[in-house]
Amino acid sequence: MHTTTLTTGAVRERLHTLVVIDVRTPGEYAGGHLPGAHNIPLDDLEHALPTLREAADRSDLLVVCASGARSQNASVTLSRNGIPAVSLEGGTAAWASAGGDLHRPAATAAPKWAMDRQVRLTAGSVVLLGLFLGLVIHPAFQLLSAGIAAGLVYSALSNSCAMATLLGKLPYNRTDRTDLNATLAALRNN
């Protein structure tokens, strides 16, 4: 299913008319989000459908994530449920690169690494471990490195990232759990 995307320029012109839904993890959202964005992590999207339907009746929905992949998946889910939405092309990374303002909470308990940085660290560590164990213990351990390489190629071709999905479920990334009920109440009052 094809989803509609908007460029950063188009979003900049229309931001004041859009309801922005950020589907990243709470930690990623806290690291910087579009002005006025509401955090509804992708895992919670199904629960939020009735409120999102109401919001879409009042205004156009813009769904954002870090790169645009998760927001496109969210747009497909919304579309399947009769809720029109568009996705920000390139996500918050493109928004920030184009000079767009990112809002951050005034105080966060501990700064969190962006998901792409966590993926790079994890992938690099597993590649190095596979090479080291392949040299020291048995060459078969090099398959770890090959598996990560194949996963990175697939990630680039499919514009999805299984490692990011798995890392997003770790307690480190879920400690500042979004108060979904408060977010949904704010959407209803928008």
Image (cartoon, helix red, strand yellow):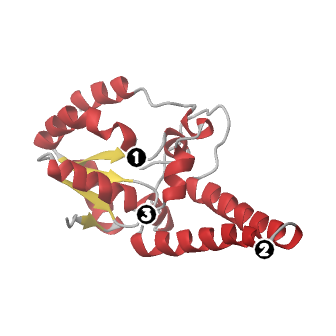
Q: Which amino acid does label 3 sit on?
A: Ser
Classify mark 1: residues with Cα within 10 Å, few (<14), some (14-19) or many (20+): some
Tell me the residue at 61%/32% (across/down). 107
Q: Position of residue 125 (x, y in %)?
A: 74, 61
- Image-quadrant location for residue 44: top left
* Residue pointed to by mark 3: 160
Q: Distance between the residues labelled 3 and 2?
A: 30 Å
Classify mark 3: residues with Cα within 10 Å, few (<14), some (14-19) or many (20+): some
Can the viewer see residue 65? Answer: yes
Q: Position of residue 187 (x, y in %)?
A: 26, 32
Q: What element carries label 3?
A: loop
Left or right? Give the position of 129 relative to 68.
Answer: right
Tell me the residue at 31%/59% (across/down). 72
Rendered position, 116 above or below 183? below
Q: How far apart are marks 1 and 2 (CA)?
A: 51 Å
Rendered position, 153 above or below 130? below
Residue nearest the viewer, comparing 28 with 136: 136
Label disc, if present, on residue 35 of the rendered structure: 1
Q: Do callouts 1 and 3 mark residues in contact (Cβ within 8 Å)?
A: no
* Residue pointed to by mark 2: 139
Left or right? Give the position of 96 relative to 136.
Answer: left
Q: What residue type is labelled 1?
A: Pro
Which of labels 1 and 2 is toward the front?
Answer: 2
Q: What element carries label 2?
A: helix
Rendered position, 151 above or below 75? below
Q: What residue type is labelled 2?
A: Pro
Between discs 3 and 2, the one toward the N terminus: 2
Q: Do callouts 1 and 2 mark residues in contact (Cβ within 8 Å)?
A: no
Which of labels 3 and 2 is toward the front?
Answer: 2
